[in-house]
Image: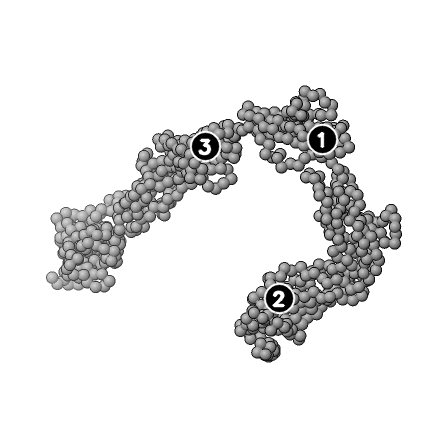
Amino acid sequence: MVHSQNQPRLKILPASSVQRKPVGHSLLLTCRPEVPDTNLISDLRWNDNRNMTILPKPAGQSSPLIYTESIAGGTALALIFNSLQESMAGTYFCAASYSVTEKLNAAVVVETYVAITWKDAPTDQRPLMGTDYIVRCEVTANPPATVDWLRNGDQIKSSGRYVIENRGLLIKNITEADDGVYTCRAAVMATGELKNREIRVEVQIMPQVQRLPLVMDAVEGQSFSVMCNATGKPVPEFQWIKKGTQQNAADLDRFSVNSITGQLDISTVEQQDHDNYACIARNPAGQSDSVMKLNVLIRPKIIEFINITVSENEEAVFVCKAFGRPAPEITFRRYGTVEEYSIGLQVSDDRIILEQSTDDEKGETVGTLRISKLATTDDGLYECIARNRGDVAFKVGHITVEYRPIFDHLKALPPVYTWEERPANLSCFAQAIPNATIEWRFNDRRIQDLYDQNLHIETEGLRSDLIITPRDRRYYTAYKCVANNRLGSAEHIMELREARIPEMVPQAKPRIVSATSITFDIMAPPVEPGLPLTAFSVQWKEQFQNDWNFALNRTWSPDSPYIVEGLRPQTAYSFRFAARNVVGLSQWGAYVDQSTPRRSEPETPRILHTPIQDEEEDSDPIVTSPYADHFDMRWSIPVDNGEPIDMYRIKYCPGTKVNGYWTEMEEHCIEQDIARMTNYEMRSLQADTYYRIELMAHNAIGFSKPAHVLMKTARGESDHSLGTTYDVYPAGFGGFSSASTLAGSPTDVILLLLTVSFVCRFVFV
């Protein structure tokens, strides 16, 4: 229809005669009069597809699905659709009156369609591995939409494991490899609408708990831990259930559960924890469990082990009772030893039998150690040992062996000596269980019945002392000690003898004579058992003196060197000797005349190292150093022969012995004077090398004769100025070593070659 510009009409905006909108969307249609004078417009309204007038929104109320609203200062009327529904499709009319008499009309067709809507298409889906799973993607649209699937940008076609259905994409026997992002693509050709829905698929794996041990042991009073392991995707969480009470272990006192690692901890195990426990692993794919039995072990306790007393030659029955779970095993052993007795007859001693009886229900064990023909050597401490899987317990008991009195400890004692009516003490103590009583006899008569004032008995504890005052010789005789207990008696003879001074010294000989001292060897006179010598004495005077009253004296203990010092050189002396015991000094004897020599150089020092080898009788002794590069030389102080030693001279040279002759390397000799010492440390020595050492003592008169020794250093590296290592051997030791070290300076190498040439010259003579 063509309207002139000035002809009154109604115009609907948007201007299209057909408005096509998706369901659920909002829509605004405006009816605007186009008239010369808008003041002449009346009764402006909208009618719906059933030709019913659409009312404006009621004041103060929420907006209805469809309503009208006056706009543009009342010159236009809007039709508002809050949410289009399929039922709202149809023709809508705008009507008005102009100048009262002229009726104006306009119409618009509203068409609706359903847009692509994801009805059942979760963006995260977690199928269970091994199942046939439909990746859900249901689409609603009007006109209907077509759906296809993509993975990683590639289109999926229905074939094999993949089937495209109305509900979604069916994946048969889904595996972990099917994890990924899938695209559900919906298209409506009529409207040109295209939508994609990305769906993340994560294949879940049901937990699988690794099988726990059927039984696990926990010790009462100790801590306990067990780990539960499981596979699954996503990572499962763990729970422990105490089966007997169906309690969650995490809620129990002393229990703790790590839900991430599956570890069950019991801080202190109690007997009530004895039960079955299930470890349950859960994730969204399901759950799995494994059951183990917690066997609470009760550590052994020895509840009875009583000391026993048994007479000699009878049978000892030693009983030990113990409790624990499981019932413990019981063994015995002598306290302080390692070897335990075994069940049954002992191979090492057929008198001993170990028996054992067990009550598993009560958890009690009785161990019995039987010893037949009990001997005194069986007396002592024994250890009962009770052990089970939980622990081991120990307890010590004592077997006391009763036996008749014995005097074994007194049999080796010497007689008792006294003299000059001095009181003597005869002590008697008998070994016996039970304790023995002691009585004394003199000439087979009880001393208690003699009332002899010279015989007095004192008793203190188990010991009895007979105090004898020998007023005459008849008391120097044998006395009998008699011990009694209920198992028997024993006798021991003790002898009182009269002590006398020693006999004369039979002989004394000078062994070392110097200008100022003489060392003697003294032959001791025979002695009585129990009456030892306590000292030797010497008197000496110059020979021209006849009176011994002016002699000098010296006394030595029997185990010391017998040296007379302070003598004058070149002087003749007379010596006599005596021995002393507790009674007194013997008569003088063993007369010796000896002259001292003139003052002279010291005697030869004595080297204090033990030789390891002598090649020949006249060869130098060989000693070894434990070190490769040094040696601590030690010697004893020699006799100075009248003048004090003021120094020592030591000289040591490396060398070798060829055809019986010692050859020194003079250019390497070291000579050193030493203050009055008795040791010298030789340093910077060659490893595995022989050295000839010469030592002399010096006094104001001169040097002593030298002491010689061959010393060999140990194998090993040397750190010294020569920079080389020699193997120098005397004849018979294999000659020079070929393992010389040439890694020194050029000077060192030249020195080594000269040394080898020097030695080889003697080897091939």
Residue shown at 41% from the left, 31% from the top: 366
Q: Which mark is residue 616?
A: 2
Q: Which mark is residue 476?
A: 1
Q: Can you tell which of label 2 and label 3 is closer to the viewer?
A: 2
Tell me: residue 471, above or below residue 682. above
Q: SS of the residue at dot 2?
A: loop
State which quarter of the image contains the N terminus: bottom left
**Of the residues shown, which amino acid type is indicated by label 2?**
Glu
Residue shown at 21% from the left, 48% from the top: 65
Q: SS of the residue at dot 1?
A: loop
**Of the residues shown, which amino acid type is indicated by label 3?**
Ile
Residue shown at 15% from the left, 59% from the top: 160
**410 with respect to 541 (left or right):** left
Residue 244 placement (x, y as % from top left): 32, 34
Whole-angstrom CA distance, mark 1 to mark 3, is: 47 Å
Residue 670 placement (x, y as % from top left): 68, 70
Q: Is residue 517 visible?
A: yes
Q: Quadrant of residue 709?
A: bottom right
Front residue (pair 256, 36): 256
State which quarter of the image contains the C terminus: bottom right
Residue 121 placement (x, y as % from top left): 22, 53
**Of the residues shown, which amino acid type is indicated by label 1?**
Tyr
**388 with respect to 115 (left or right):** right
Tag 1 or tag 2, which sits nearer the N-term? 1
Residue 256 placement (x, y as % from top left): 39, 41
Name the residue that disc number 3 marks.
Answer: 371
